[in-house]
């Protein structure tokens, strides 16, 4: 049985939504978790009749099952992966798989009732859900908080931290946590990161404020339970890319590639793998197994194994983890190409000290002018929000292309 | 040599505040409270300063009040230039 009493949220409405989700997960029906603005649309989908639809924040909509219509075996959970450009991709799980992965996470982290757990992670995505489920299984309290949206709110969050605090967060939030260099907490705080790559510079920035912290770097994917491996180290011993040993039952191998000097494709055989993808209209996009060979799942990451530890070196697939979201480069290109006046665009990922990686866009136009860059950024902002401001945009005059014509 | 504040101001208006009237942004003394900035876009602001300052990260030197307004961001930029002895293009 899940112990839903251990999960709290500083916002009473969000706490109610999470607890109703947990009751549905445990007892009543299959559950779909989607963005707040999609709850209504999804709760009217015929294929979700008899399910519960929630955003784990404020909405919880039972979808009545018409009489005589079978509603399945009430053992499924679907939720969105965190892509922000293009249509959302939903992953589909058996509840038993979610429980099994959460149990492995709880054991690996050694959840301790004497520590005070705080989560700044959105509860509706894979990382947040894994926190909810692992704490319920372990019977260890965790308090969710909305991500602070101002410097003063971050200061208020720092004020509630104690030596026995453990904070779940995503890497780009580390800059805010460590923002005030005059603030310092000497206690053995634990900072647990997942969701995107944690860089050395992020941890270096944290060190003055959290000199005795433990940094736990978790690696996984929404399609894999979500957790694959976990590395825990004193803040001084943190090594970028080291995501530690696989969870119990998870096997990892690295397939060599001819086109890179170091490492290869990270491939995972996990008992916590999803059942498949599903579209908003309930269709199987037939992508569920397209990247898998037998039980092995190609993660799209490049890495290597060293003394049993998996080291993630970067991304092989056509997407980047950027300010907490997975951004597909060809979707960025499609958005840019849709802007009037744009002839073509080339998008790549470039390293950045603050963001880890960021998209860089070369935009080919026939007649350069100041308004094109603005139009491109607005189009990207419409689909990506504030993160669009950090995308590197270069406007390229058609006449200045090299003879090869390569952008 | 790095960009002048006027150039940085133009970049901020074009890349971060592009949805808003420059005059309204300029007049605000509480960019977050007035809805011009959120925690993510503040990171974008600091990332822009970082891009210009090279290895001198404003992220470890910024104070909560430094992003209250364009004027305080300007003061932060000038302070970082001075502390790291970087010349601004005149």
Image (tube, coloured by chain):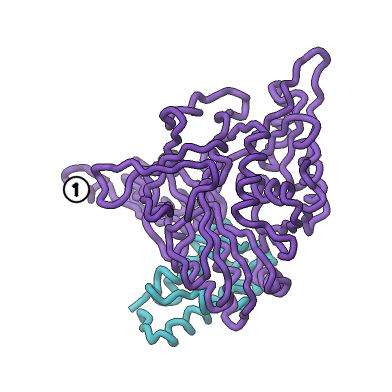
Residue that sits furthest to the left in the current view:
A403
Vertical placement of residue A28 versus A172, above or below: above
Residue at the image position 81 percent from the left and 39 percent from the top? A23
Asked whether, in this view, residue A343 is left or right of residue A386, the answer is left
Residue named by callout 1: A402
Q: Is residue B31 above or below residue A374?
A: below
Q: Position of residue A319 (x, y in %)?
A: 43, 45
Q: Nearer the viewer, residue A204 or A318?
A: A204
Quarter containing the N terminus of chain A: top right
What percent of the width, then of the height, locates residue A3?
79, 47
Residue at left 77%, top 25%?
Answer: A50
Colour chain B is painted in: cyan
Q: Which residue is drawn at 45% across and 68% down?
A: A201
Q: Is residue A120 above or below residue A257?
A: below
Which chain is assigned purple? A
* Residue A104 placement, left or right of A65: left
Secondary element at image label 1: loop
The answer to whether residue B71 is seen in the rendering is no
Q: Which of A271 and A149 is in front in this view?
A: A271
Left or right, A375 with respect to A213, comes to left
Q: Position of residue A218 (x, y in %)?
A: 53, 54
Q: In which quarter of the image is residue A343?
A: top left
Near-viewer residue (A399 or A405): A405
Residue A42: % across, % down: 70, 31
Q: Which residue is drawn at 19% across and 48% down?
A: A402
């Amino acid at each position: 049985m899940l112990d839903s009493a251990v999960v709290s949220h500083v916002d009473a409405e969000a706490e109610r939504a999470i607890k109703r989700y947990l009751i549905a997960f445990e007892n009543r029906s299959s559950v779909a978790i989607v963005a707040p603005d999609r709850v209504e649309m999804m709760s009217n989908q015929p294929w979700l009749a008899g399910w519960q639809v929630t955003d784990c924040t404020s909405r919880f909509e039972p979808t009545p099952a018409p009489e005589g219509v079978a509603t399945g075996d009430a053992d499924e959970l679907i939720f969105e992966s965190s892509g922000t450009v293009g249509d959302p991709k939903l992953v589909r799980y058996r509840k038993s798989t979610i429980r099994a992965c959460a149990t492995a996470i709880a054991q690996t982290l050694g959840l301790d009732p004497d520590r005070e757990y705080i989560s700044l992670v959105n509860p509706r995505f894979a990382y947040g859900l894994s926190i909810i489920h692992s704490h319920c299984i372990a019977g260890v309290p965790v308090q969710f908080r909305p991500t602070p949206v101002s410097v003063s709110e971050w200061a208020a969050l720092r004020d509630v931290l104690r030596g026995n605090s453990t904070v779940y967060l995503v890497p780009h939030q580390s800059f805010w946590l460590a923002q005030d260099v005059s603030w310092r907490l000497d206690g053995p705080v634990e900072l647990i990161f997942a969701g995107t790559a944690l860089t050395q510079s992020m941890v270096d920035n944290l060190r003055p404020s959290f000199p005795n912290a433990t940094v736990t770097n978790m690696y996984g994917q929404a399609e894999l339970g979500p957790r694959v491996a976990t590395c825990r180290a004193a803040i001084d011993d943190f090594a970028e890319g080291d995501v530690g040993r696989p969870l119990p039952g998870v096997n990892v191998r690295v397939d060599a590639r001819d086109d890179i000097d170091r490492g290869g494709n990270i491939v995972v055989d996990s008992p916590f793998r999803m059942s498949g993808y599903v579209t908003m209209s309930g269709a199987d996009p037939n992508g569920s197994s397209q990247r898998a060979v037998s039980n092995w799942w190609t993660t799209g990451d490049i890495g290597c194994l060293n003394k049993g530890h998996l080291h993630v070196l970067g991304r092989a697939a056509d997407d980047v983890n950027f300010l907490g979201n997975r951004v597909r480069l060809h979707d960025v290109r499609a958005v840019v190409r849709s802007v009037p006046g744009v002839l073509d665009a080339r998008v790549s990922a470039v390293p950045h000290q603050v963001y880890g990686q960021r998209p860089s866009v070369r935009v080919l136009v026939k007649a350069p002018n100041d308004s094109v860059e603005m139009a491109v950024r607005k189009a990207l902002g419409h689909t990506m929000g504030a993160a669009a401001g950090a995308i590197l945009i270069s406007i390229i005059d058609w006449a200045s292309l090299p003879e090869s014509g390569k952008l | 040599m790095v960009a002048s504040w006027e150039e940085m101001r133009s970049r901020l208006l074009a890349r971060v505040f592009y949805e808003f009237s420059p005059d309204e942004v300029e007049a605000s003394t509480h960019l977050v409270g007035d809805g011009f900035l959120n925690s993510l876009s503040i990171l974008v602001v600091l990332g822009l300063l970082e891009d210009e300052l090279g290895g001198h990260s404003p992220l470890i030197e910024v104070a909560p009040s430094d992003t209250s307004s364009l004027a305080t961001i300007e003061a932060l930029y000038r302070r970082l230039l001075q502390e790291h002895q970087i010349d601004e293009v005149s």
